[in-house]
Amino acid sequence: MSKFGVVVMGPAGAGKTTFCTALIEHLRANRRSCFYVNLDPAASEFTFEPDLDIKELISLDDVMEEMSLGPNGGLIYCFEFLLENLDFLTIPLEQVTEEYLIIIDMPGQIELYTHVPVLPSLVKHLMRGSLNINMCAAYLLESTFVVDKPKFFSGTLSAMSAMLMLEMPHVNILSKMDLIKGTIKRKDLKRFLAPDVNLLDDGEAAKKRSKASEVSFDDPAATTNIMTGASFDRLNRAVAQLIDDFSMVSFLQLNVQDEDSVGAILSYIDDSIQYHEAQEPREPKEDVEVEVEG
Ligand SMILES: Nc1nc2c(ncn2[C@@H]2O[C@H](COP(=O)(O)OP(=O)(O)OP(=O)(O)O)[C@@H](O)[C@H]2O)c(=O)[nH]1
């Protein structure tokens, strides 16, 4: 048996650290051990102190001050520095035994997942060589995005981009389900769990918009036209079609206040890692359900 771990990713504020906390509480309640790694060089508040914290190696505040960089450039610098100093991770993680679930809490800057190759290099280091950790990615997207469909599909695209870039078992999670409880019907929610391309086609409104398809750049309202005109509808449909063609994105539901929901996601992560380890073809599982009124 090899070591195993989960890397928790997603946009800023998606609930990554809160999910890590809920996972640790759940593991402790079930007498399982974990090793918690914080890789967000800007994070400061934790319910459970990390066993390993990137800030012991480098902090974003110091980098921004000393290198005169902004938050995004500073974060990339921190990760490049980490890649040059991988012993910081390797030495402690080599000591972690197979009974421990390694939980890695990542920063929220989306550039890290989609624009630069630092994360794939880091993941390769963790999954190969002396560490040889069986990893799974947990990608969180905030459930309130379902009220803003283009935002939801843009989030779905970034989840897909991370999935393609990292080439590891990948679990997508709609977080903060408590915030949409009672605001969306169960059958409507299902269309978001396995994103339905027709969600972006809002029928009559889209047809009306397409009549005003010509965009004049002399027009001061041009930006608004771009966002509401026929081009925008076509772009939305193309994006949705891309997701549909890949047919790879589906979401589990997470409510951190519901222990069963956290447990169900953990067992999905466990399964993903084990399937990958055994290199057996993966059977699709039922959606993880939480109570949603409607
Ligand atoms: N209602 C509700 N709020 C949540 C939930 N999860 C997280 N939050 C809140 O969302 C905010 C962001 O949560 P974090 O866990 O810090 O999110 P993060 O993804 O780690 O944030 P960054 O590291 O800054 O990217 C906090 O105010 C949390 O209390 C949830 O399940 N329900």
Image: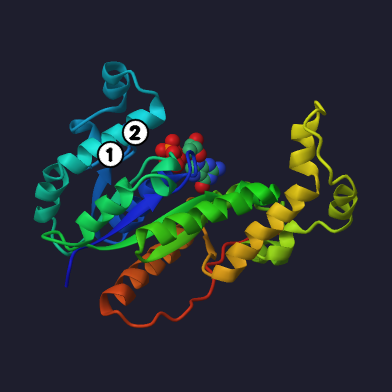
Helix, strand or loop at disc 2?
Answer: helix
- At a point 79% along the width and 43% down the height, the residue shown is 228
Q: Which residue is mark 2?
A: 75
Q: Is residue 83 visible?
A: yes
Q: Is residue 194 visible?
A: no
- At a point 15% along the width and 52% down the height, the residue shown is 93
Q: Nearer the viewer, residue 106 or 97?
A: 106
Q: Quadrant of the N terminus?
A: bottom left
Quadrant location of residue 83? top left
Residue 240 image position (x, y, % from top left): 65, 60
Q: Nearer the viewer, residue 170 or 213?
A: 213
- Would you place residue 284 above or below residue 16 in this image? below
Amino acid type, callout 1 = Phe
Question: Is 181 displayed left or right of 275 in the figure?
Answer: right
Amino acid type, callout 2 = Leu
- Would you place residue 71 above or below residue 165 in this image? above
Circle on res. 79? 1
Q: Are marks 1 and 2 in contact (CB under 8 Å)?
A: yes
Circle on res. 246? none
- At a point 41% along the width and 68% down the height, the residue shown is 268
Question: Is 14 displayed left or right of 23 in the figure?
Answer: right
Residue 263 image position (x, y, % from top left): 41, 63
